[in-house]
Image (cartoon, grey):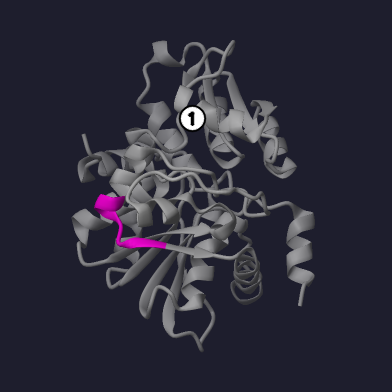
Amino acid sequence: MPLTLDEVRRARQLIAGAAIRTPLVRLNVWDASAEIFLKLENLQPIGSFKIRGAATAMNLMSKAELAGGVLTASAGNMAQGVAWNARRLGIPCTVIAPDTAPMTKVRAVERLGGRVLSVPFDRWWQTFSDRGYPGIDGAFVHPFDDERVMAGNGTIGLELLEELPGVDTVLIPWGGGGLAVGIATALRALKPSVRIYAVEVETGAPLAASWKAGSPQVVEYRPSFVDGIGSKTVFSNMLAMAQELLDGTFTASVDEIAAALKLMAERNRVIAEGAGAVALAVALSGKAGGGRIACIVSGGNIDAAKLASILSHD
C-alpha cells in the first residue's frame, strides 16, 4: 500500500521527544536567479534527518520485536538515528557499515553505544535486500525501504509547507529514496502543484540513469566526501514510487557540492555534510529554475579535516 498523508501525520506525534522541528532559513545570497531556502536537518540531535524515520519505526515496533535489540545498515546517519533511539529505549544496537564510512560517523555511533561492523561496500548494500546479517539478531530497521521510516521523513514536508506555503520547488537528496518519497508524499497531498526533484552526486547517481531508462540500472560508484548518498543501483519499488511522486532528477558534481557547502558556511554559518549540500548545488546551477526553491540540508556530519580542506580552498 502507498504511504499516506495520515501516516505522515501520525509520525509527527511519534517523533515528539526525539526529533526537533528544524528551522527554514533563506540563503544569504542576493544575486541568485531564485529565492533559495534551506531546511536545516543538520541541526537534529544526531546531525541528520534520519532520527525522524528511526524514531517512527522503532516507536511502532512491539516490545517483543525490540527485545533482541535492533540492527541497521548505514554509512553513518541512519546508524546514529537507530543508535540514539536504542539508547533511549535501553536496547542494544548493531550497525553494518561500509568500509568507506567516515570515522566521524562511526565514532558517533559508538559514543551512542552502538556496535559497528565494517564490511566491503557490496556486502553492505546486500544487507538492504537481505534485511538482516548472518549471525546477528535484532529487529532490522531499514534505512529507506520501510513505510514507517518514510512516514517519519515525511514530517519534513509538513513543516516545510507550514513555513513556506508559497514554495515552488523542493530539492531532496536521494540515497535510497526514503527521504524523497516521504517528503513528496506529504507535498503531493497538500500542494499538488509543487515541483519536486531528487538530487544526486554524479559519482553515484543510479536514480538519474534508472529514471531515463525506465527501469533499475547499475552505474559506476566512486567514493567521495559525499558519503551520505550515492550507490550503484536503486530498488525497483523505490523507483516506482519516485516515478509516481517526483517530477524528475538532477545531479551535481563533487566540485559543485563542495562549493555549495562552502557557500552555506560562509553566508549562513551552516555546516553541512556532502549529501546535505547537493540540493543547494543543484539550485545554484539554475537547473531547477527560478521562484522559491527549498533545499533539504539532510545532514551535517562531516569530518573536521575534510570541512577544513573545503573551507580553505579558493
- x, y percent for residue 237: 32, 38
Residue 258 is covered by the magenta coloring: no
- The residue positioned farthest toward the front in the image shown: 213
- Total numbered labels: 1
Can residue 156 be seen at all in this image of the molecule? no
- x, y percent for residue 152: 37, 41
Q: Quadrant of residue 190?
A: bottom left
Where 119 falls versus 185 (above or below)?
Answer: above
Q: Mark 1 falls on what kind of element?
A: helix
- x, y percent for residue 145: 39, 35
- x, y percent for residue 23: 46, 62
Foreground residue among 200 and 147:
200
The residue that mark 1 highlights is 128
The residue that appears at 44% across and 71% down in the rendered structure is: 37
Foreground residue among 214 and 71:
214
Can residue 143 be seen at all in this image of the molecule? yes
Where 285 falls versus 148 (above or below)?
Answer: below
Name the quadrant of the N terminus.
top left
Q: Quadrant of residue 74?
A: top right
Residue span colored magenta: 243-249
Where 43 falls versus 265 (above or below)?
Answer: above
Name the quadrant of the C terminus.
bottom right
The residue that appears at 35% across and 39% down in the rendered structure is: 236
Q: Quadrant of residue 252?
A: bottom right
Decide: few, some or many residues near mark 1? Use Cα within 10 Å; few <14, some 14-19, many ≥20.
many
The residue that appears at 25% across and 39% down in the rendered structure is: 7
- The residue positioned farthest toward the bottom in the image shown: 31
Name which residue type carries label 1: Phe
